[in-house]
Each structure stands twice: as structure tokens, then as C-alpha cells.
Image: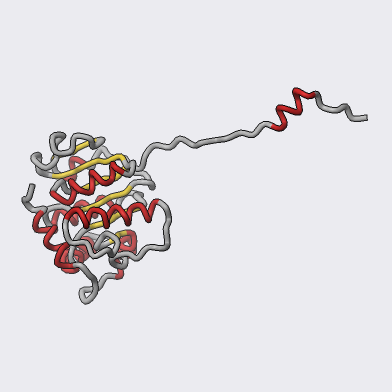
Amino acid sequence: STPKPSSAASDVYKRQLFIEPIVPPRRAYIFGGGHLGLVVERLARSVGFSTVVIDDRTEFACHERFPEASAVLAGTFEETTRGLTVDSRALIFIATRGHFLDAEALSWALSTCAGYIGMIGSRRKIQITRRRLLESGVPQEQFARVRAPVGLEIGAVTPEEIGISVLAEMIAYVRRSSAVQPLERRMSECTPGEGRRTEPSEAMHEENRGAA
């Protein structure tokens, strides 16, 4: 006959294992250290993201302005992005001070495997940036990865409200929520005659050119 397991052996068999995976926080790369970048960086940290701020202006990319960011990088985007390693869990937010810089940041973002890429802007700015990248050789299908203009439709106007809209969309992406309404379709589907909240987005773009 088959021997019965001892009491000690039975205890082992009955034990349950609880496994809690430990993963590093998601990293949010924020291009543009202007007013909106400042708001988004603080909000991103408040929900547990690690943040990296990138700006070509030293006065906007400094530890005095972003004391709790994981990294603050000042210099040309070509220089500052050279050593960055981006994984598929990363989030990239673009709110620079000009169209050319937007295109440069977005070109780099599309060269990575980042899961979330969002860019602030009016319809006009989005079309200019898209056209510039198409002319430089970026494939059309890549623009389906870009959320532009970025954020959820909550009627946001102020930098703080727009920042909340952006973070809400990031959280919806991370949590894979389907119960949210995006502000705009993906960049590849945005046409000059469509879009909402263009005035506040354009106002923030102008502010990022030189506002503290």
C-alpha cells in the first residue's frame, strides 16, 4: 500500500506562495522645461513615475527648477538623447518652445520603443511637424504611435489643467483603460480641418518659447 505522507510533509504541500513582482517605476521623458513641462513633471512624480527633463536652455533644465527629477539634461537634443536607453514601458511627452525642436524630439521618440508618445500643439503645429518628419524619411505608419494633440478631453485651459489632462491620458495608457475619450485621434489621422482645444495648446506652445 502507498504510505501516507507525514504530518510535516502535509504542511509543506498545503503552503501557499505569494509572489509580488518588484519592477522599477515607469520613466517619463519630458521634452521642454517651460511652464507646462514643470507641471507635467511634478504630476508624473506624484503618481510614481521616474522623470527625465530635457531642454536646450540651461535656465529651464536645471536641478534648481526640477530638484526631484531623476535626471535633468541641458543641451541640444542630439547630445542629450545620445546616452538614453528607452524601453517599451517608457512615456515621452513633448512640449518644446518651437516647431523645429518638436520635430527633432519627435523624430528621436519614434526611433525608440517607447509605448507612449504624446505631443502638445495646435492642428497647425502638428501638421507642420508631421510634414517635416515625412520629408526627412519617417514612415507614415509611425505617426500612429503619436498622441497629438496630447491629453484627455476635459475642457482644460490653464497649464495646470492641461497637465492633469496629459497625466490622465498617461494613466489611462498604463492601466489599459478603454473608458476614456482622447482629445484627438492619433497623429496619422489628424487632418487640418479637425481637432479641438487648439487655442490653449497654441498658447502654451507660445509660452514655452520663453516663459518661466
Residue positioned 78% across, 24% down in the render: 7
Residue 62: image location, x then y, percent: 13, 36
- In the displayed structure, 12 sits above or below 48; it is above
Residue positioned 49% across, 37% down in the render: 21
* Colour basis: secondary structure
Residue 142: image location, x then y, percent: 32, 60
- In the displayed structure, 94 sits above or below 59; it is below
Q: Give the left or right position of residue 176, taking residue 182 as reference.
A: right
Residue positioned 26% across, 37% down in the render: 83
Outermost residue toward the right in this view:
1
Q: Quadrant of residue 69?
A: top left
Q: Give the left or right position of residue 124, taking residue 10 as reference.
A: left
Q: How many labels does the image show?
A: 0
Residue 181: image location, x then y, percent: 35, 65
Outermost residue toward the bottom in this view:
193
Q: Give the left or right position of residue 185, taking residue 105 as reference.
A: right
Work out whether residue 116 or residue 46 is closer to the camera in this orientation and state it.
46
Residue 84: image location, x then y, percent: 27, 40
Work out whether residue 191 or residue 171 is closer to the camera in this orientation and state it.
171
Outermost residue toward the left in this view:
210
- In the displayed structure, 160 sits above or below 140; it is above
Q: In which quarter of the image is residue 161?
A: bottom left
Residue positioned 61% across, 33% down in the render: 17
Q: Give the left or right position of residue 20, taking residue 23 as reference.
A: right
Quadrant that contains the N terminus = top right
